[in-house]
Amino acid sequence: MTNPEAINQQAMKPLWRDYLELCKPNVVALMILTAVVGMFLAVPGMVPLDILIIGNIGIGLCAASSAVINHVVDKKIDILMARTKNRPVAQGRLSDVHALIFSAVMCVAGFWMLMVFVNPLTAWLTLGSSIGYALIYTCFLKRATPQNIVIGGLAGAAPPLLGWTAVTNEVHGYALLLVLIIFAWTPPHFWALAIHRKDDYAKVGIPMLPVTHGDKYTRLHILLYTIIMFVVTLLPFVTKMFGLLYLLGAVILGIGFLYWAVVMVINKNPDAPMETFKYSIIYLMALFVIMLADHYVYPLETRLTSEQPPIELQVAPPQGAGFIPLTSAE
């Protein structure tokens, strides 16, 4: 069912903006940011320019392709929700066929770019992430369980790993730590929005946690997951992936997130859910920028070298000569 009044209001809207809206550009931009940071963290110096440009275009195209699928699959519920009722497919400004063709072209183009100009590992991981969001989460998990965003969050947490593998062609433990951070961040980020839009989700029968278990239960779980996220963000420092600059930033940003989580639990501020949601976006962006700054201010090799000085061996020369020190490097 479409809304004629809304269509009339959008009649003069340029068509390219409808296609852009299908791609969820704000979401994709945040994903690309984490992918770019993943690329730079994988190397001590500059990322090869071709990998930086082509890799992120490929990752972005595949992510946008998945977003389009979400618009098509959710069009019947989008039209009933205040936040999504004016989306192009929901309103009929773009047909399902046109949207799916657009999605397929972006997916094929992105996968091809990654496969040919980057490496097959990144191409297949990106495709798997796209399938995870577009099909597993959107088509199944979203309607099947209140833990949908917890399980499905893994697909959205993949970009820093994709950026890392684009440069190194290997899955590294540090890259998986970055994935773990976003994975732990996703539930409190999205549940805050779900509380704000609880009535919309209830109206369309989507079993988001506030709908199935109530606000109080969800607010408590936002706090618990925020604590988990805070602990997880300390692991890169503990494992010597980052230095003191990152630790300081992670603690300050984490305390801010914990503050809003506690405000949510106290439940005396009606604006807390949206304020928490907005802060969570700033939090993730700032955290990854701080990672990048720390990576170049306190290079990993420098920290390891300063903490693990060369071992000196004393070799006895022929009689009459002094001792000759040898380092492990020799």
Image (cartoon, rainbow, N blue to C red):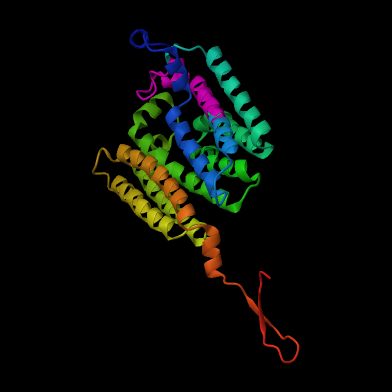
Residue 80 in magenta stretch: yes
Residue drawn at the location 49% of the way across and 37% of the way down = 31
Magenta stretch, main secondary structure class: helix
Q: Is residue 161 above or below residue 89?
A: below
- Coordinates of residue 325 in the picture (x, y in percent): 65, 80
- Coordinates of residue 217 in the picture (x, y in percent): 38, 44
Q: Quadrant of residue 248?
A: bottom left
From the viewer's perspective, tell me whether residue 257 is left or right of residue 44: left
Residue drawn at the location 55% of the way across and 30% of the way down = 57
Instruction: Report whether residue 139 is seen.
Output: no
- Coordinates of residue 174 in the picture (x, y in percent): 56, 52
Nearest the viewer among 119 and 3 is: 119
Q: Quadrant of residue 83?
A: top left
Q: Is residue 214 above or below residue 308?
A: above
Q: How many marks?
A: 0
Q: Which residues are magenta?
A: 61-90
Nearest the viewer among 240 and 46 is: 46
Residue 71 in magenta stretch: yes
Instruction: Report whether residue 43 is seen.
Output: yes
